[in-house]
Amino acid sequence: MSDQSSVLIIDDYAVNIELLESYLMTSNFNLNIYKATSGLEAMQIFNSKELDLVITDVMLPDINGFELCRMMKDLRQENFLPVVMVTALTDRSHRLQGLASGADDFLTKPVSGDELLIRVGNLLRLRKATVDLNARYTEISQDLKLARQLLNDFMPKGVPFDGDLQVDLIYQPANFVGGDFYDFLQVDEDTYGFFIADVKGHGASAAIIVAILKEKLYELKDYWTAPARLFEQINGNLWRFFSNTRNDFFVTACYLLYNKEKKEVLWANAGHVPPVLFKEKQIETLDQVSSLPLGLFEEVSFENGRYPCAAEEALLLYTDGVFELPIFGHPSRYYSDIASIYENLPADLLDLYAPRAFMTEVRAALRQYSQNDDVNIILVNL
C-alpha cells in the first residue's frame, strides 16, 4: 500500500459527493479520490483501481448500497477493503442489513465532517495494517516454502540397504516445515542404523535445528556403533547451540541399530516415544532405557538397550504425531502409546497385529483427516 490512499465516494447526488470530498480534502490524509453516481459506475472503478476505502450511499439508482457492498466484499475476500455506508436511515433493521452485507462503519445524514474524518482515519489505518500484515504473511510463506524444500533435501533419498531389509516409511509434515527428522545409516556390512527425532516446534526454526542435527550426526560418524555415546556427543553440541538462543528448544530422539548376523537390536532413547517390536499376535515396547531429550542440559547420561530378535518380527520407530490421528475407530488423542492400541483388541481383529495393518490404518487416516502434528513412522521387517 502506497503513502497515498485511494477513496471511492458513491452517491447519486453530485452535491453530496462534493460535500464529502470537501471534508476529506481539508484533512491531513494523502488521498486520491474517485467518484461514482451509480452502482455500475462504482463497480467499473472498483475493477480498474486498487481502492483503500469506499464511502457509499445506501440509495442508488440501479442497485442499493447493501448489494454493492456485498459484491465488493465477495470480490475482495483476501484483501480487506473497508466500506462506510452513508444513509438517512436510522432504523436498527437497516443497520443490521448493512452489517450483514459486510459494511465496516456507518454515517448518518447530515454527515458531520469531524465524524467523517475520524472514521475514515481509523479505517485507513486498519486497511494499511491489514495490507502490511498480508505482505508479511506472503513473505513468510515464501520463506517457509524454501525452508520446506531445504528440509526435504536433508531427508534420505531412499533406503541405502534396501534389499537387505524390508523398510516401510511414512513421513508427513503437518505444516510447510515440520519438526520431525529421520535417517538411515549403513554402519557396516552387517549393521543398519535407524535414527528418528522430533524437534520441538515447527517452521523455519525447526528446519534450522534439523539441519544442525543432521550435520552433527554425520560429523560424529565414528560414534554410529555406540548409540549412547552418539547421543552424549549430539547433546553437548545442541546444548551449546541452544544456550545462545532465548528459546527453550530441545530434541527427542531414538537411535536403533540392527545387526543381522547377531540378530540383535541395540538402541538408545533421548526422551522419545520408545520403539515397538511386533511379535506373533503381540507387541513389546522397548522402554528399558530412556533419558532426557537432547539439548536441555550440558551433560546427560544415556544408556544402551539390547534385545535379541527372532525371524518374522518387525520393529517400529515413530513420532507421537500419530496419536493426533483418529485411528482404529477411536478419536484423536485416544491413544498415548502403541501398546494401548492393542491391549483390548477383539479376537476377530487379531489380523491387525500385522504391522502392515498399522501402516495401512495410518495412511488411511492421513488421507481422510487434517493433521495437527507431523507423522513419521519407520517400519523394519526383520
Image (tube, rainbow, N blue to C red):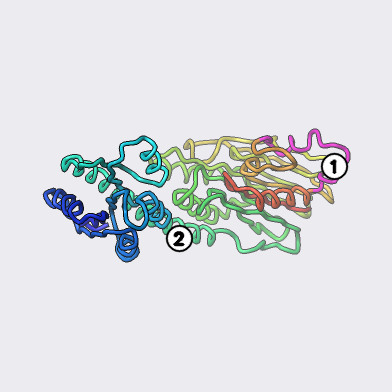
Residue 286 appears in the figure: no
Element at label 2: helix
Q: Nearer the viewer, mark 2 or mark 1?
A: 1
282 versus 362 height, above or below:
above
Check if residue 321 falls in the magenta segment. no
Q: Are marks 2 and 1 in contact (CB under 8 Å)?
A: no
- Work out how far the residue at label 2 is from the one at label 1, CA to CA, in angstroms: 44 Å
Residue 288 place in picture, x, y as percent? 70, 35
Picture disc at residue 188: none
287 versus 370 height, above or below:
above
- From the viewer's perspective, is 151 left or right of 264? left
Give the labeled residue for mark 1. Answer: 349
Residue type highlighted by circle 1: Leu
Give the labeled residue for mark 2. Answer: 146
Of residues 372 and 131, which is closer to you in this image? 131
Residue 345 appears in the figure: yes
299 versus 262 height, above or below:
above
Residue beneath the point at 23% across and 42% down:
109
The residue lying furthest to the right in this view is 348
Which residues lie in the magenta part? 334-354
